[in-house]
Amino acid sequence: MRIRLIGIVVSVLAIAAFARPVAGQTLPRTADGKPDLSGVWQAVNTASWNVLSHQAEKDVPAGLGVVEGDEIPYQPWAAARQKENFANRATADPESKCYLPGVPRITYMPYPFQIFQTPGHIAITYEYVHAVRRIFMNTPHPDGELEWFMGDSRGRWEGDTLVVDVKDLTGQTWLDRSGNFHSEALHVIERYTPLSANHLNYDVTLEDPKVFTRPWKMSMPLYRRMDKGMRILENECYAFGFEHTWLRPPQ
Amino acid sequence: MVEAPAVKHWCRVPIVFAVVVVVASLPRAIGAAGQDAQRPAAPAGGYAAPRTPDGQPDIQGMWNPIGTFYNIQDLEFQARYQNFRDDPSRRGRSLIIDPPDGKIPYQPWALAKSNEVLQHHADPTPQYLDPNARCFMQGVPRHLNNREFEIFQPPGYIVVFNMAHHTYRSIPLNGGPHIPERVKLWMGDSRGRWEGNSLVVDVTNNNDQPWFDVVGSFHSDAMRVTERFVPINADSIEYTAVITDPKVYTRPWTLKLTFTRNKDYGSELYEESCLEGNEKTLELMLTRPGR
């Protein structure tokens, strides 16, 4: 874990060197004139551990948080549930079971993801557990009561911002490793705004009338991974650690 | 009872069906685009698909393999274990076109290992359970020999999406080198190129975990796969995979599949999680009395 933390620090420094906007730089654009978001991206922050500000603990890097106002407007019962989740997080966190992590949590986990862009359809493939999202442009959500771990995503362009409306999520995913959570009524609006060729701003609005008293927002930059030969690898979480259980064949 | 995930999938059918009805009426975003485009005349010896904006032959859309993933060396084998029609005249047919006998050219030790799984596959203890039933990635080429999959062609890439196990596989076409040999992946490292109207993909860095089928046909982490996707008309692709693995086989062998365009599905795949909820089914199956 120490090596991993050092790795994160090194990555932050390496990425920071590239992230400075270049004077006069123009955004790369696709043939239809939209910003070209294609490529491999990654968040560099500690929201995966806690979306709110927090100090360091063993195996937890410190961070200033990504939530506007640094407060999640839980309803009273939900605030109590979050505390319970936090106390039980070692086993209650869906990440500990290697489940698909949901939206927006997948975006700020410490793994890269790749955006593929065409005019009618944007796909995001994530290194973590081969999670994948399909963002169909300018189309309605399907009818019916669906609950998908990664939700149903519908996109549109507002100027140079890609706006993605995400519904049909489950109540089985959390927002971080600290027990922050939502219900299946969660409605997420993501806004991907390019700031330069190599960084985006990622703004998220979360609405969930069953859990929160009002909509609230997260905001963070996403950085292009510029490593030589960069490609998404694999992190098949559930294939680790089963070596000594019934699930894995004896070798 | 080897297909444990099916238990869960069948539970999902009403939801999926409802969505199919709705989504099928949505505009077909990607898959049908090529069908309506003006097509160049097919040159002798091959079908010239319409081109994508970056000049690739356009083979986008939903596809289904014809065949079975149960036993790639005997397509009617499954009938013995499940209540399917067993047609003796079809027994022994194989997806393997080379060697001519349709059998995987295993080294003797590997044949013994494979046969052991074959004998126990219908009532498996953990070591004989298909990795696919554990929700592990299906690997290459099996992820193309299961159920519906989608081919997506953003600029410079082929991306294949599988609904089962929410698998994807991206194939860069930029001529870049493979990743370092010591990195092994469930879905391998694919590098593709178009040779005229045919897509040729070289797949290395495979790990030794996925099987080719339910009955234990296997490979090692030295496997290399050379795939060829040849569109033969707007709705069919002939696919061959040459499998090389000097640790396990005595010679390279070739598997052949045909993909047909799935016109029933609409243009969107749905989320089909596997591990989420499947673990208990597996545990019950493998820990039931008598195990």
Image: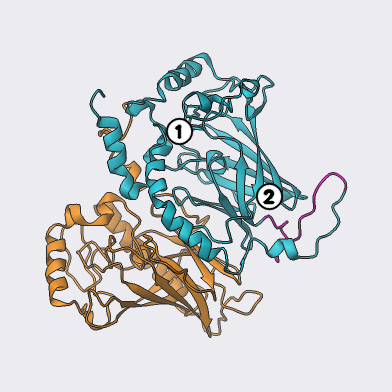
Chain colours: A orange, B cyan
Q: Where A108 sits versus B170, above or below?
A: below
Quadrant occupied by the C terminus of chain A: top left
> Of B54 and A224, which appears nearest the observer?
B54
Sequence-earlier tag: 2 or 1: 2
The boundaries of the magenta stretch are: B44-59
| Mark pair 2, 1: CA separation | 25 Å
Disc 1 target residue: B208
- Hey, which quadrant is residue A138 in on the image? bottom right
Secondary structure category for the residue under label 2: strand
> Of A110 and A174, which appears nearest the observer?
A174
Q: Residue furthest right?
A: B44
Disc 2 target residue: B193
> Of A82 and B223, which appears nearest the observer?
A82
Residue B52 among those drawn in magenta: yes
Residue B204: x, y in percent? 55, 40
Q: Residue at x 27, y 42 (%)?
A: B280
Q: Give the residue type at disc 2.
A: Arg
- Hey, which quadrant is residue A211 in on the image? bottom left
Q: Give the residue type at disc 1.
A: Asp
Residue A185: x, y in percent? 31, 71
